[in-house]
Amino acid sequence: MRFRFDRSFSLHVVSPLTLLYANRPAIPILMYHSIRDEQQSSVHPYYRTTTPPALFDEQLRFLQREGYMSCSLEYAVNQLQVQVSRANKLVVITFDDGYGDFYRHAFPVLQRRGFTATVFLATAYIGENPIQFRGRDCMTWPQVRELHRNGIQFGSHSVNHPQLRTLSMQAIDDELLQSKRTIEDELGGPVTSFAYPYAFPQTDADFKAQLRNSLQKAGYDNGVCTVIGRATPNSDPFFMERLPVNSGDDTQFFVAKLNGAYDWMAKVQYISKMARRQHLALSPR
């Protein structure tokens, strides 16, 4: 196994300290992308986006054995507002992009282990026949409708999966509203959750305020982003933190993330993005 400082620090330094705040309200929202067997040895484990089906099954088997219950984002927000104890062992399982392997590999495991999930769709890549996104087939609308009938929830991941921060506010409004309406038309019910595509610009307070306003205006109630950590009563319900999960997460590391031993990475993320923003601001144009 390739050495990972974040894993080593989480397991050997932070994990022993998690007992000090074990009863504080926090809900892990797991972030998956693709569930399939794929060699990503050339990609650093932190940046991988695939999880082998066998490992996914192992992770859900652990959640099942430990008494975790999966829930929707709406339910998680409501529970955090009343500051439910983490002892309730709630978990939200999310998938970005809507790859076809969710239908083939992830859903059967979720069913077998008694869990549900929320899948965020970039609607331009969901059609009556498979459409590829980043070289991988995405689900079709017939598959999405079948999954919806079987308890899988769906949210928006925009229409075209753009870097929203580079768009005008009108274009952002269009991405948020059109994707929401498309999914609602296909499924015959409300869509209230949104997942921000790409790395979330957490250091840009003005953009966050504008985006929150756009989400509310479009009719969303909650959302998630790529900021690392568990959701807490202090989380912004439109930009809730998540825990990335991929092929680099052995069971020990997976458990550490669930228990809060990876939450410290949010500070590293923030400092790194702030430094990059300041560097760009000072660079000659």
Image (spheres, rainbow, N blue to C red):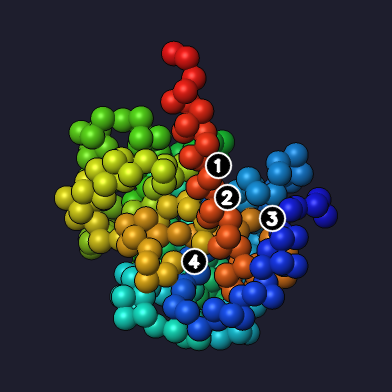
247 horizontally vs 21: left or right: right
- Residue of label 1: 272
Residue where numbered disc 4 is placed:
230
Type of amino acid at the residue the image marks with label 4: Arg
Q: Residues within 10 Å of mark 4 (few under 14, many from 20)?
A: many
Q: Contact (CB < 8 A) between labels 2 and 1?
A: yes
Q: Please, what is the three-letter code of the amino acid marked with disc 2?
A: Val
Mark 4 and mark 3: Cα distance apart in space: 16 Å
Residue depicted at x 75% and y 60%: 8
Q: Which residue is mark 3?
A: 6
Q: Between 265 and 173, which is closer to the camera in this rendering?
A: 265
For image coordinates 74% across by 53% down, the residue present is 5
| Residue under label 2 | 268
Q: Secondary structure at mark 3?
A: helix
Q: Could you say which disc has been placed on residue 164 in the image?
A: none
**Whole-percent x and y of residue 168?**
26, 30
Nearest-to-viewer mark from 2 and 3: 2
